[in-house]
Image (cartoon, helix red, strand yellow):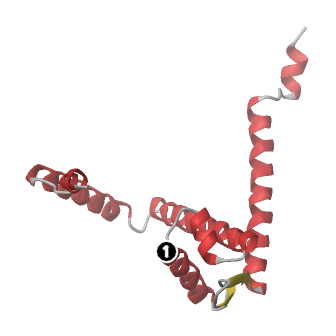
């Protein structure tokens, strides 16, 4: 354990390198603020957040408890709870319905809005995957009609 704690004691060089990286990231963000690149970056963060929320909702639906869903998603219960509560605050509706535990433990289920969000995400994800697969096949594996005419 002491060996692990020794790894967590940065020296001056480590701190200096962290400051350099932080400064460079800060300058990069200043450079791209109010640009299309920043919009794309924020969009990517949004999609990642929606993906984690949908995955968590799917696991709650499958296992019936937020505790088990968080464990299966390899995130802390507190992080999972905060993710759900933050989404509920932004959307203005409840995502899951919880029943406090007793000797048998608690239970969680998706609310109607949580179910709608999860179903919408699954449908959209499936449509995007189908489109990307078709587009990939068209671009890399199919010849055009003009290519077929040139062959003997």
Against 43, residue 18 (above or below) is above
Residue at 86 percent of width and 24 percent of height? 146
Residue receiving disc 1: 79
Say if residue 15 shows up in the picture. Answer: yes
Residue 103 is left or right of residue 24, and the answer is right
Q: Is residue 149 above or below residue 3?
A: above
Q: Is residue 105 left or right of residue 29?
A: right
Q: Is residue 4 above or below residue 112?
A: above
The location of residue 89, given as percent across then percent down, is 57, 89
In the rendered structure, the answer to whether residue 39 lies left or right of residue 64 reads: left
> What is the quadrant of residue 67 in the picture?
bottom right
Q: Is residue 152 left or right of residue 120?
A: right
Q: Is residue 18 above or below residue 96?
A: above
Q: Residue reaching furthest top?
A: 152
* Whole-percent x, y for residue 84 in the image: 58, 80
The quarter of the rendered structure image containing the N terminus is bottom left
Look at the image and tell me whether residue 47 can be seen: no
Location of residue 96 in the rendering, given as x and y in whole percent from the top left corner: 68, 84
Label 1: element kind: helix
Please tell me in which quadrant of the rendered image residue 128 appears: bottom right
Quarter of the image with the C terminus in it: top right
């Amino acid at each position: 354990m002491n060996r692990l704690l020794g790894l967590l004691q940065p020296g001056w060089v480590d701190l200096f390198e962290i400051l350099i990286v932080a400064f460079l990231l800060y300058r990069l963000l200043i450079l791209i603020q109010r640009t299309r690149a920043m919009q794309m970056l924020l969009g990517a963060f949004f999609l990642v957040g929606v993906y984690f929320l949908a995955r968590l909702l799917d696991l709650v639906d499958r296992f019936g408890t937020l505790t088990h869903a968080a464990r299966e998603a390899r995130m802390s219960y507190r992080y999972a709870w905060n993710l759900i509560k933050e989404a509920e605050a932004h959307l203005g509706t409840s995502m899951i319905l919880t029943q406090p535990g007793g000797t048998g433990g608690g239970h969680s289920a998706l609310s109607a809005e949580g179910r709608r969000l999860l179903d919408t995400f699954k449908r959209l994800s499936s449509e995007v995957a189908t489109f990307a697969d078709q587009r990939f096949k068209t671009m890399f594996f199919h010849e055009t009609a003009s290519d077929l005419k040139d062959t003997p």
